[in-house]
Image (cartoon, rainbow, N blue to C red):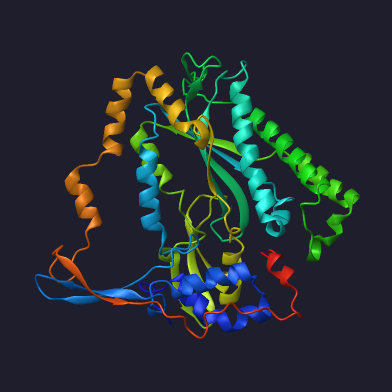
Amino acid sequence: MTTAAKLEVADIIRGTESQLASRIAPSREQWRVLRAIRQCRTAALGGHVERCSDCDHQRIAYNSCRNRHCPKCQAGARAKWMEARASELLPVPYFHIVFTMPSELAPLALQNRRVMYGLLMRAAGETLKEVAANPCHLGADIGGLAVLHTWGQNLMHHPHVHCVVPAGGLSCERTKWVNCQRSKKSGKLFFLPVRVLSRVFRGKFIAGLKLAFQRGELEFHGRLSHLSDRHQFETRLNMAVRQDWVVYAKRPFGSPEQVLKYLSRYTHRVAIANNRLLSYASGKVTFRWRNYAADGTWRTMILDDVEFVRRFLLHTLPTGFHRIRHFGFLANRHRAERLKQCRHLLSGSTCEAALAKTTHPPAVERESNTRPECVACGSTRIVRIEIMPWRPTPHHRVPRPHFAINRSQIYNDTS
């Protein structure tokens, strides 16, 4: 039995590797993810030997895989990304809007991840821009950040997009900043009507999905093969259209510092973190999960180890797919120009004071966060004395699944 203090997703992958090809037949892309996580910070990827100049203590530091699905490789990437985003914050409250794909269409996304995840993110961003530009609502050109998540707490497939947007935007003439108003009933800051967002989002997503079907961009395998027929496909869409799509808004943030701290919880998160794993014994994995559908309390779930890996692989993103995107005046094409304009309209001095805490941390703090410390004496005088090169192992090649295996069975999202 692996103890909780040392248990990692990599341990479960190593314990199930001999069974995966015959039971769930991962794709080549998913095999690469499994291999990267299994080899992360091990001798297989090489590393270096460090020595403390004060106490002569030595330790081996192995290289990380840097795969975006690896639970151990997100802290460094998150810190760098957040440092770059700090300069883009505005001194206004921020809203958090969540767009969710309905359960009737979620299985299609498992077989058409690049098309449908991209459509989900575009529809969410375009919905916010369109409704906000309407003079009956905000009447402004807004900008924001969208982050794709495909999982729930129990590792089941649950595609949704988290959007974080400033409470306001540029006027149509870009001559003034339009602030969000407060509700007359509650007195709370109000962004956009959720019911309107839900219906516009539904219309845009369905229209985009029909266009993708007409262009032949969608694939249907296994249990979904009947949807290749146009009548069956439209029947599935009608089932999704008849219900209200889940769009909800969380309470606004109070300061740019809170936004920066909050974003760090979402931008580089993976399906499950190592600290949620409790035990792995006799082919069973026990982990913690929060039941948001009930009272939001923490509960314990036990899964077969192969089923655990299957659920983990459901959230593998296509190679090159961008799960963090900007839209509106924060889009990459004109971000610098529009941000400069926003700060000018929001009063430059106020903006600079609000951003100073997040953009320019103290020099001592930056230095202490970047220099490694000796585990024996705490000294930061660490020198690298030896390089251990990466050497391919006999198991470096990605295994090919047997042709008798139906690869689509990995998409059968069982409860």
Relative height, residue 320 to residue 35 (above, below): above
* Residue drawn where x is 70% and y is 32% of the image: 199
Relative height, residue 230 to residue 377 (above, below): above
* Residue drawn where x is 49% and y is 61% of the image: 272
Q: Nearer the viewer, residue 273 or 355?
A: 355
Would you identify the image quadrant in which residue 310 lies? Answer: bottom right
Would you identify the image quadrant in which residue 410 lies? Answer: bottom right
Q: Position of residue 83 (x, y in %)?
A: 35, 44
Q: Position of residue 352 (x, y in %)?
A: 29, 27
Left or right of 329? Residue 114 is right
Whether residue 100 appears in this view of the structure is no
Q: Nearer the viewer, residue 98 or 324?
A: 324
Q: How many marks?
A: 0
Q: Position of residue 197 (x, y in %)?
A: 64, 31
Q: Quadrant of the C terminus?
A: bottom right
* Residue drawn where x is 69% and y is 50% of the image: 115
Left or right of 224? Residue 325 is left
Q: Quadrant of the N terminus?
A: bottom left
Q: Position of residue 328 (x, y in %)?
A: 54, 31
Whether residue 137 appears in this view of the structure is yes
Left or right of 189? Residue 307 is right
Would you identify the image quadrant in which residue 155 lies? Answer: bottom right
* Residue drawn where x is 66% and y is 79% of the image: 400
